[in-house]
Amino acid sequence: MVALAIIIERLTSLRASRVAPPQLLDEVLTLTRSGLPSADVVQKLEASSPLGAVLSAGIRAASAGKAVPEAQVRTAFEASGRVVVHQLERYLSTLGSIATAAPLLGLLGTVIGMIEIFGAQAPTGGGGSNPELLAHGISIALYNTAFGLIIAIPALMFHRHFKSRVNELVLTLEQATDQLLPQLSGGRRG
């Protein structure tokens, strides 16, 4: 249930349109061409999306003075980007842990079931064992392993998908900051 909840939450949270709206960078580039926007516009930009949060950090750094060096703006982008990446990777370690632990827990259940089955057999060698009951007990014990794998396989697939998705989104954020950086540090302050 936890893995399913994480998968649903990450599917909705890691949409490109939510993290990096397609027109946002163009709007910010247009807005900053004639000068830096006001504080309330920057605050709205920050609240709009993770990309907006990163871009607004650079704009705030550029607003600090007349001749802000490019390195200072880049540092602001990077600091904000680390926070955003942490938010994008939220719950992924939990999903990875579920993918890793589920088959082990299933195997543990199977081993415990097998111990119980063999412990319940007659201790003497004289025909007290029923092979049909033994086979039925073993098949029931193996359900634990099957359930563990049923949980682990999709969890692992989605974990890897989400890690790849986060990497794509981080690249998009980096490219956006690279496009805005020259404009913020190019001396066009209003």
Image (cartoon, rainbow, N blue to C red):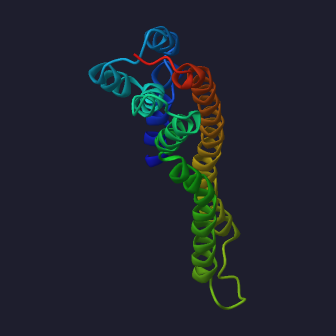
Residue 105 location (% of width, % of height): 57, 64
Residue 49 seen? yes
Residue that appears at 67% across and 91% down:
124
User: Horizontal placement of 63 versus 176: left or right?
Assistant: left
Residue 1 location (% of width, % of height): 43, 46
The tally of labels here is 0
Q: Quadrant of residue 122?
A: bottom right
Query: Residue placed farthest to the left in the image?
Result: 40
Residue 179 location (% of width, % of height): 61, 20
Residue that appears at 35% across and 23% down:
42
Query: Residue placed farthest to the front in the image?
Result: 66
Query: Residue placed farthest to the bottom in the image?
Result: 124
Residue 140 seen? no
User: Horizontal placement of 101 versus 53: left or right?
Assistant: right
Residue that appears at 56% across and 56% down:
97
Relative to 57, residue 52 above or below: above
Residue that appears at 62% across and 66% down:
110
Of 44 and 59, which appears nearest the observer?
59
Residue 103 location (% of width, % of height): 63, 58
Of 116 and 110, which appears nearest the observer?
110
Of 116 and 151, which appears nearest the observer?
151
Task: Quadrant for the C terminus, please.
Answer: top left
User: Horizontal placement of 132 versus 30: left or right?
Assistant: right
Relative to 78, residue 183 above or below: above
User: Horizontal placement of 44 versus 87: left or right?
Assistant: left
